[in-house]
Image (cartoon, grey):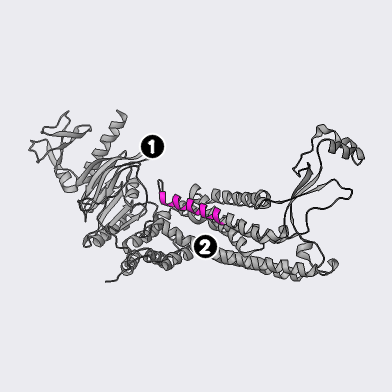
Amino acid sequence: MTTAVVGTAGIAVRGLGKRYGKSVALEDCTFDLPEGRVAALVGANGAGKTTLLTVLSGLLRPDAGEFALRPDERVAFVSQEKPVYKHFTPKEMLRLGARLNLVWDQARAEAWLKRFDVPLDRRCGKLSGGQRTQVALAVAIGSRPTLLLLDEPLADLDPLARTEVTRELLAEVADSGTTVVLSTHIVTELAGVADHLLLLAHGKLLAGGDLDELLAAHVMVVGPRADEPPVEGEVLWDRHLDGQSLFLVKTPSTPAVSAPWVVRPVTLEDYVLAQLSITRKGDSA
Amino acid sequence: MTTVVKPRVGWGDLLWVAWRTHRTAILAMTGLTAAVVAGVFVLMGMTDTELGGLPAIYFRLFWQPQDTNLLFGAVIAVFWGAPLVAREHEARTNLLAWGQDVPATRWLAGQVVLLGAVATCLAAMVWMSEQYMVDTMRELSEGRTFTPFTTWYEVAPHLQIGYALFGLALGLAAGVLVRRTLPAMGIALVGFGVVRVAVIEWARPYLRPPVHTFEAWNADYKNQVPDYAMYVGSGYADANGVRIDYQGSWGCGDRVGSAGQLDCLKANGVAGHFAEFQPLERLGLFQWIETGIFVVLAAALLALAWAGVKRARRV
């Protein structure tokens, strides 16, 4: 296994595979992620999101394939457990970050904790789950990474904190050229945050690419109950409610339809749910 | 700009992290060791008038220097070594500690160097108390026969340090392999006890080929093992001094004490007694050889832990 540097800027992943005994966590996973992107890593539970992030962090050795990062890439990884030392105070956690990293921005890390009202001198074991998440994020942000890997960063946060964290994260990385890969299964929160999509199912990359391009290449066609939509293009997914049919159609341009049919743009949520339900159907077939 | 950039993460950084992580364990262990050491000093001063002014701790409680030793090494193995990496896995903090700009192996180096250094100092403290105990006993009990190979064999600083480092490495390796603190503690405790006792029982008498002596049948029984030597073995031997094991089929046992028994033995080729022992002069050499054994074991276990932390096929 080598991580040879290839010409592509950002992350180049080629045929990554990882299995635990007989269960496949990641299989032939290939994609490119240009630098400076905020990529949403989406997939059902057990899709391989955590495995992919842990491999990219360098902490886990893959069984197959390889990946290349930018030269001198500095990776920060916040795993889904948001681990902190329970007997350390947040202040000491930041000292640990300062000690163990080549680059450290104390003011940035402290500002993050202050922004989210995390007491600096209380032991982490006595903080709430959400506050511990903030401490883990502060350490990652303080190390000024060029690649920030976040596994379910929003899971322990309340709805208000979620939007604030995503906004602050974006502000932090916007002008620094940091590439971000964040996994989640709460798709709605990614609207307006991510500009790249990595969709995993059963350890394989189902779809990936620039989010706007992906969404622009599809439309949702809605109309009275019908077996087929009145438009050209590949039907990726369909759903039939009482008096209504929905079709997710892959088409290069927005097709014209006549009433009562309507064509509406595809949202990230539409797209992800459609893709995931395809794989689920594929299972039962 | 508040960003600080440094060329490398130095030993000071690694040691600070190790100190902050294990501060409580280090202070507790240091306090405990100091208490035990102080206890030995105090108890050695409390003599027993019934025993004619001899220290009661040794002659009444039968507290031997090696008891402290065995306890000390086991505690290091169980409470310092075993949790070192196992607890990181349990709390998933390995993903934090090893995910910064320092590889897991360097992080581990910082942890092992700090704990190893402190364990070395504490082992030296334990040795001092034991040396005092031995010196006092020898002074107060003039004329009594001690067996150096049992009573003060282990009272040597290098040997103590070897035991302690072995304990640390054993616990660490167990924690790296099983990744759970309690099972690692159990393995460390049992493993430390088994290895230490096995070395005492089966390795120590044979660290050098024992001196072999032979006495032909003689009217007077002669003790062949010199004073202060370590007894290894004795028994019947043929004319060349080669050991002969008594066979029940000879039937000599029926004639215990009679002249006939001797004739019976002679008829079966027994020409006299042999003895095997390690002379007192070898005491220092043996201490160094045994130190070497434990240091080599510690190094092998450390290497195992290193590889286990580095391999990361599973995190």
Whether pointer 2 and pointer 1 mark residues with C-beta atoms closer than 8 Å, the reply is no
Is A115 situated left or right of B221 in this image? Answer: left
Under mark 2, the amino acid is Leu
Q: Is residue A165 left or right of residue B160?
A: left
Q: Is residue B251 magenta?
A: no
A175 vs B179, nearest the viewer: B179
- Residue B82 visible in the current orientation: no
Q: Name the amino acid type tagged 1.
A: Ser
Q: Position of residue B12 (x, y in %)?
A: 43, 68
Helix, strand or loop at disc 2?
Answer: helix
- When asked about the image quadrant of residue A143, the answer is bottom left
* Label placed on residue B115: 2
Q: Mark 1 Cα within 10 Å, few/some/many (few <14, many 20+)?
A: few
What is the distance, in whole Å, between disc 2 and disc 1 at their CAs?
A: 39 Å
Give above or below for B278 relative to B264: below
Q: Is residue B162 left or right of residue A198?
A: right
